[in-house]
Every structure is written in structure tokens, then in C-alpha cells.
Amino acid sequence: MVADPLVEQVNGKLQELDQKIQEFFDQINGVLSWVPEAFAHLIEPIQRGMEVVNQKVQEFWDRVQQWRQQPGDATVLRVKSEIWASAVANPIGDVAGDVALEKLDANVDWTGRAAEAYKAIVPAQADGLTGVKDLALQIRNSLNSLANALDAFNMAMIIAVGVFIVGAVGAIAAACTVAGAGAAVGAIASAAGVSIGLVTTAIVAMNSYFDVIEVEQIALQQKIHDVGSAWSRSDREFSDGSVRDGDGTDWRVNR
């Protein structure tokens, strides 16, 4: 099965960001390693700034850790949703149409108490099958909604990581001198802060949506349970269909 393309994009952006952050640290370390004695007083502010950058970087990776462990897969969700439609809802819908009372030969060929009970129960069973079809379509829609939410979250992640990458690239370019290193440290720290805010907002929005989906899924589980307990049954004896055994059979041929 094809992997979720947006998940692949996020992974690619995270790898690129990791590389750019390392390049930035290497650039700063390289600049500080040959600072002339006359500019030694500039090192301490840069070092303090790098401590802030370290904290921001760690906070960012902490924010995306859960995504790395459980990225989700909207592609799989959409495949599963279509299975609910094609393998469950559509066939059951066809069966519901086939068992409509006006389409059954038994409605015409047989009479008797069992026949009347059979005629009475068929419409309720057809309605029950239609209910199962509707339930399957609700499950499909729920899975599609969750897939769309995952897509929106991954798009937000791509934007958040992209902001950090742009900030890191600019900081690398600026950190080629001691004078530029201080500004570069501030720039990448600022980019990290913006990215952390974007990721946090996306996580909060996704968690809120998960709460909605969880309530919806619980309701669907209850509906699935209710299908079995609410299925219409008859207490009539349908098996005695003989017209030659001499008893008062519940089924009689309609002539």
C-alpha cells in the first residue's frame, strides 16, 4: 500500500531541518573557534544565546515526538472507508432491496398463519438491513473525516517545519562572522519559537477533533451493538411447510 504522501513530506522536512540545525551549530562553533582576542567579549552573549537556541530546539523536537511515534495514515483510513462502502453498505443495500415484500414469491405462492407472519416480518427486516447500510456509510464518513483531519494536521506540520528551516538557512548565512553570529542566534531562536507555536496550535486542534471523533465512534459502536438486539424476529413456526402430513400446517399453497 502506498504510504501517506503528506507523512512522507513531513518526514522529509524534519530530516532537512535536522541537517540545517546541525549546520548552524557547526557554523557557530567554527566562528567562535577563531575569535580574535579583541573580540573575546562578544563570545559570552553568543554562548548565552546558543543556550536559548538549544532549549528551543529541544522543545521543538519534544513537540513533534508524538507525531513521529504515531503519524497516522490518511491513505489507509480512506481505503478502509471505501471498504465499508463497497464491501458492506452496497451489498447490504442490494439485499435490502431484494427482500422487499413485493419482490418475494412467498408473498404470492403461500397462505396461512406462518405465511402471514412472514409477510409481517419482512418489511421490518428490510428496514433493519437498510439501517445496517446507513450505519456502514456513517462509519465510512467518520473515517473520511478523520483522514481529512490528519491531512490538515500534516499540512500544518509542513508549514511549521518550513518556517524553522527558512529561519535556520538565514541564520547559517548570517553566522559567517562574529558580528553576524549574535544576530543569527536571535533569528534562529525566533524562528524556533514561531514553529513551536504553530506545532502546538496544530496539536491542540487535532486533539480537540479527536475528542469529537471519539464521541462519534462510541455512538457508532452502540449502534452496531443495537443492530443485533433490535433485529425483528417472528415467533411463528416456519419449518412446517408440508401439505401432506395431515396436520394443520402453518403454510398452505395459494392456488
Image: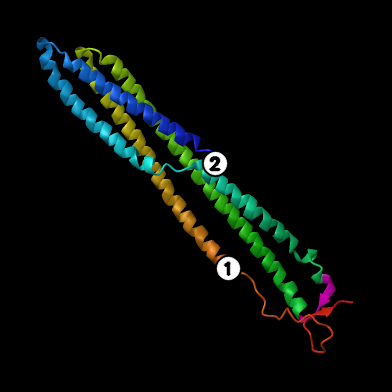
Residue at screen point 75% across, 72% down: 119
In the picture, measured across the screen, residue 232 lies left or right of residue 254, that is left
The foreground one among 127 and 166 is 166
Residue at screen point 79% across, 88% down: 248
Up-down relation of residue 212 to residue 164 (above or below): below
Task: Tell me where the magenta segment starts and ends, as one range.
Answer: 108-113
- Residue 148 in percent (x, y) is at 50, 41
Up-down relation of residue 127 to residue 52 (above or below): below
- Report the number of discs: 2
Camera-nearest label, 1 or 2:
2
Q: Is residue 164 visible?
A: no
Residue at screen point 79% across, 66% down: 104
How crowded is the residue under tag 1: few (<14 C-alpha within 10 Å), some, or many (20+)?
A: few
State the mark number for residue 228: 1
- Residue 49 in percent (x, y) is at 19, 25
Which of the two labelled residues, at mark 1 and mark 2, occupies the earlier sequence position?
Answer: 2
Q: Secondary structure at mark 1?
A: helix
In the picture, measured across the screen, residue 148 lies left or right of residue 32, that is right
Instruction: Tell me, yes or no, whether the highlighted magenta stretch contains residue 252.
Output: no
Q: Secondary structure at mark 2?
A: loop
Name the amino acid, label 1.
Gly
Rounded to the nearest whole Å, what is the CA distance between mark 1 and mark 2? 34 Å
Q: How is the image coloured?
A: rainbow
Circle 2 is placed at which residue position?
A: 1
